[in-house]
Amino acid sequence: MPEAPISPAAVIALLTSEHILEPQEHLTPDTDLFSMGLDSMAMMQLLLQIEEHFRLTVSPAEMTRERFATASALASFLEEKRLLAA
């Protein structure tokens, strides 16, 4: 059975359930994650969780602001990466 696509909702759930971000307002797929507190320490925590939950490794060269800007952007990047690895 194929895995479900990595969705923005899954990224938001990961960010909040693992306490990587503790936003004061509701996160949407297009919320700017950096304005919600995503900094270098939070990105390192997020990378560890991505490896654990999605079984994907993100290299430092792939960690661009554009890819991590929103839950939608990150989900698209991770899903593309997963499909290329299959």
Image (cartoon, helix red, strand yellow):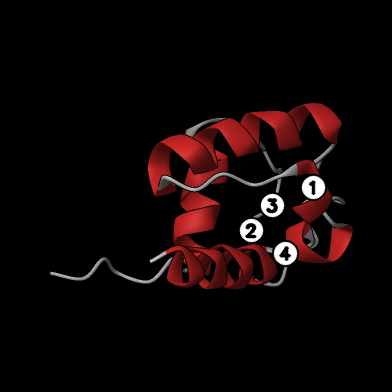
Q: Compute the Cα span from label 4 to label 1.
A: 10 Å
Q: Tag 2, which secondary structure?
A: loop
In contact (CB < 8 Å): disc 2 and disc 3: yes
Q: Tag 1, which secondary structure?
A: loop
Which residue is denoted by mark 2 in the rendering? 27
Q: Residue at x 49, y 44 (%)?
A: 14
**Residue 28 visible within the image:** no
Which residue is denoted by mark 1 in the rendering? 36
Which residue is denoted by mark 4 in the rendering? 70
Q: Compute the Cα span from label 2 to label 1.
A: 9 Å
The local crowd at label 2, few if under 14, some if 14 to 19, many if 20 or more residues have their Cα within 10 Å, is many
The local crowd at label 1, few if under 14, some if 14 to 19, many if 20 or more residues have their Cα within 10 Å, is some
Q: Where is residue 48 in the image (x, y as percent from the top left)?
A: 57, 31
Kindly report which numbered mark, 1 or 3, lies closer to the viewer in this rendering. 1
Instruction: Please name the amino acid that badge 3 sits on.
Output: Glu
Quadrant containing the N terminus in the rendered view: bottom left
Question: If you read the primary sequence from the N terminus, does the residue marked by circle 2 or circle 1 appear first?
Answer: 2
Which residue is denoted by mark 3 in the rendering? 25
